[in-house]
C-alpha cells in the first residue's frame, strides 16, 4: 500500500477572528491525482498557501515525506519537493520564456557565488546543462519556438503552460495546480487535461489541483476533497462526489 506523501492533520487557519480553514484533514499518497473543489471563498487557495509555507497554520500539523513542514519558508518547502502554480499567473513578464524556466533550475545549482562572478569551470558546465534542460522542458510544452520571446507576449494558454513548465523545473514530488484551466476555452481545457495526465506519468508526480471547471476535475482526478466555509464536507471518487447530497447542495447548486 502506498505511503502518504502529504498529510494535513486537524489544520486550522485563523485571520483575526475569522476561521478561514477549520480542522483540515487530508492525506495524499505517492502518485495520486487529486482535486480540491468548493465554492469561491471556501478556503482552497488558503490551503495551498499553508502547504507551501506562505501562511503558517494557527493549529495542526502538516507533514511531507514524513517530516513536518510547519514554519518552513516557501523556498525550503520548494527544496523539499513541493512546487505550485498560481490562480493569477505569476511569470517574470519582462524575462524571456527560456529565462523563466532557467530561474527555477537555478534554485538547485552547485556552483558558488565566487565561481559565478569569476566565471570559473563549474559555472559554465552547470549553465550549459541548465540551458539544455530548460530547452527540453519547453519542447515538451510546445514552447521551444517562443524560447526567446518575452513571457508577457505569450498568449494566455501558453503562459499557463509556461508556469507549469517552470514549476516542473524545480523537480517536485508534489505539484499543486491552482485553477490551471482558468480563462481557457474548451479545446485548451481538453488539451490541458491530457497534458496533466501525461506529466503525472512522465515525471512520476503526485498532483493536487484546485479547479472550478467540473468537467476537468471529474475527468482526471482519482479522488476529490470538497471544501465549504473552510471545512472538508466530503471526500471520495468523482462518482461518489457527484452523488453526494452535501456536495450537490453546497457546490453544484442543486437540491439534496
Image (cartoon, grey):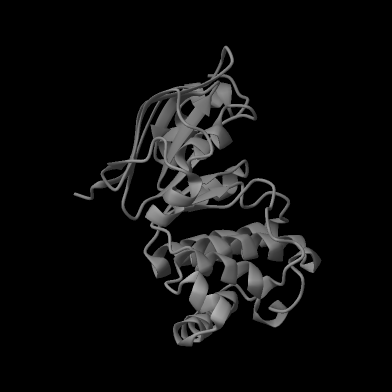
Q: Position of residue 85 (x, y in %)?
A: 58, 52
Residue at horizontal 45 percent and vertical 40 percent from the top:
51
Residue 58, visible in the rendered structure: yes
Q: Position of residue 240 (x, y in %)?
A: 41, 35
Q: Is residue 56 above or below residue 1?
A: above
Residue 134, visible in the rendered structure: no
Residue at horizontal 57 percent and vertical 23 percent from the top:
250
Residue at horizontal 42 percent and vertical 41 percent from the top:
72
Q: Is residue 193 above or below residue 141?
A: above
Numbered-mark total: 0
Which one is nearer the viewer's eye here, 201 or 95? Answer: 95
Which one is nearer the viewer's eye here, 224 or 160? Answer: 160
Q: Residue furthest left?
A: 1
Which one is nearer the viewer's eye here, 130 or 11? Answer: 130
Q: Is residue 20 left or right of residue 23?
A: right
Q: Is residue 221 left or right of residue 166?
A: left
Q: Position of residue 243 (x, y in %)?
A: 46, 31
Residue 239 appears in which quarter of the rendering?
Answer: top left
Q: Residue furthest top?
A: 17
Residue at horizontal 42 percent and vertical 59 percent from the top:
172
Q: Is residue 225 above or below residue 196?
A: above
Q: Position of residue 50 (x, y in %)?
A: 48, 35
Amino acid at each position: 500500500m502506498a505511503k502518504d506523501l502529504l498529510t494535513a492533520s486537524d489544520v486550522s487557519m485563523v485571520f483575526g477572528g475569522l476561521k478561514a480553514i477549520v480542522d483540515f484533514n487530508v492525506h495524499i499518497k505517492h502518485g495520486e491525482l487529486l482535486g480540491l473543489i468548493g465554492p469561491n471563498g471556501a478556503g482552497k487557495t488558503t490551503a495551498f498557501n499553508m502547504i507551501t509555507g506562505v501562511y503558517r497554520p494557527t493549529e495542526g500539523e502538516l507533514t511531507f515525506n514524513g517530516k513536518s513542514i510547519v514554519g518552513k519558508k516557501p523556498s525550503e518547502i520548494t527544496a523539499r519537493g513541493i512546487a505550485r502554480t498560481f490562480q493569477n499567473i505569476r511569470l517574470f513578464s519582462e524575462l524571456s520564456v527560456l529565462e523563466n524556466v532557467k530561474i527555477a533550475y537555478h534554485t538547485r545549482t552547485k556552483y558558488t557565488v565566487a565561481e559565478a562572478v569569476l566565471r570559473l569551470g563549474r559555472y559554465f558546465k552547470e549553465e550549459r546543462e541548465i540551458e539544455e534542460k530548460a530547452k527540453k522542458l519547453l519542447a515538451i510544452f510546445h514552447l521551444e519556438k517562443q524560447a526567446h520571446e518575452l513571457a508577457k507576449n505569450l498568449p494566455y494558454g501558453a503562459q499557463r503552460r509556461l508556469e507549469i513548465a517552470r514549476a516542473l523545473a524545480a523537480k517536485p514530488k508534489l505539484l499543486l495546480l491552482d485553477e490551471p484551466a482558468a480563462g481557457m476555452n474548451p479545446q485548451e481545457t481538453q488539451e490541458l487535461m491530457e497534458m496533466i495526465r501525461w506529466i503525472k506519468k512522465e515525471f512520476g508526480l503526485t498532483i493536487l489541483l484546485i479547479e472550478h471547471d467540473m468537467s476537468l476535475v471529474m475527468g482526471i482526478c482519482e479522488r476529490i476533497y470538497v471544501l465549504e466555509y473552510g471545512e472538508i464536507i466530503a471526500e471520495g471518487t468523482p462518482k461518489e462526489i457527484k452523488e453526494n447530497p452535501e456536495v450537490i447542495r453546497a457546490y453544484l447548486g442543486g437540491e439534496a
